[in-house]
Image (tube, grey):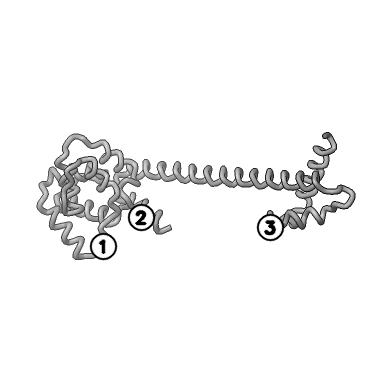
């Protein structure tokens, strides 16, 4: 749960922010300055800078750290602050103080509620789509597992009946031997009966 929360807080988890940063080619200096702002260092490669930025998940709410980041932004020109706001999908209107406040609020703990309304809608659609995919994947795995178990039980019963004296073999014998490979099988007596009947029909046709 904690890991998923951290992933959701990464800048790349917000679709509009991801697209904005990933495909930003207008001004490499803005990417370099943003990277320097977040990590106190520059990357020689712009792609690496973007990758690092997209994995950023917030600098926390420690007052000293926040104050340090605010001081850094105070040295930025207002045009650059507006460009940064646009890059990370924040409103870029208002005074320099207002813009810095929004940037700090978002980057201290990235959440969709701080983004522009259009971006928030896209993010919700993104996560709903991902959750639906996860559910579909889980259901598919369950169906596949159920199918494999069914086939294994059928094969085991078929082999057991084929190799035994049918006059002496009882359903209880089959259940006892099946329980070794398939725990709780004794709770599915009706299901086992159907498999036995199916196996007997196949053997009778041979």
Q: Earlier in the sequence, mark 3 or mark 1?
A: 1
Q: Secondary structure at mark 3?
A: loop
Residue at image mark 2: 6
Q: Is residue 41 left or right of residue 17?
A: left
Residue at image mark 3: 183
How packed mark 2 is, by other alpha carbons closer than 10 Å (few <14, some 14-19, many 20 or more), is some
Residue at image mark 1: 61
Give the Cα distance between marks 3 and 2: 38 Å
Measured along the vertical axis of the image, is residue 154 above or below residue 105? above
Whether residue 82 is visible, yes or no, is no
Nearer the viewer's eye, disc 3 or disc 1?
A: 3
Q: Secondary structure at mark 1?
A: loop
Measured along the vertical axis of the image, is residue 201 above or below residue 75? above
Give the Cα distance between marks 1 and 2: 15 Å
124 or 141, which lies in front? 141
184 or 96, which lies in front? 184
Q: Quadrant of residue 127?
A: top left
* Spot occupied by residue 88 in the image (x, y as percentages of width and height): 25, 45
3 or 9, which lies in front? 3
């Amino acid at each position: 749960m904690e890991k998923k929360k951290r992933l959701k807080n990464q800048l790349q988890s917000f679709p509009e922010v991801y697209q904005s940063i990933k495909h930003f080619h207008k001004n490499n200096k803005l990417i370099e300055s943003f990277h320097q702002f977040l990590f106190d260092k520059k990357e020689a490669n712009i792609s690496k800078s973007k990758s690092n930025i997209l994995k950023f998940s917030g600098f926390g709410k420690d007052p000293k750290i926040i104050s340090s980041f605010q001081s850094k932004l105070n040295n930025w020109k207002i045009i650059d602050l507006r460009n940064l706001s646009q890059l990370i999908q924040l409103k870029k209107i208002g005074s320099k103080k207002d813009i810095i406040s929004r940037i700090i609020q978002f980057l201290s703990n990235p959440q969709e509620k701080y983004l522009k309304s259009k971006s928030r809608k896209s993010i919700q659609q993104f996560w709903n789509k991902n959750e639906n995919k996860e559910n579909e994947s889980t259901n598919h795995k369950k169906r596949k597992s159920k199918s494999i178990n069914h086939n294994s039980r059928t094969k085991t019963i078929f082999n057991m009946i084929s190799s035994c004296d049918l006059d002496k073999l009882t359903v209880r014998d089959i259940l006892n031997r099946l329980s070794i490979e398939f725990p709780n099988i004794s709770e599915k007596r009706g299901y086992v009966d159907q498999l036995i009947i199916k196996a007997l029909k196949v053997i009778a046709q041979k």
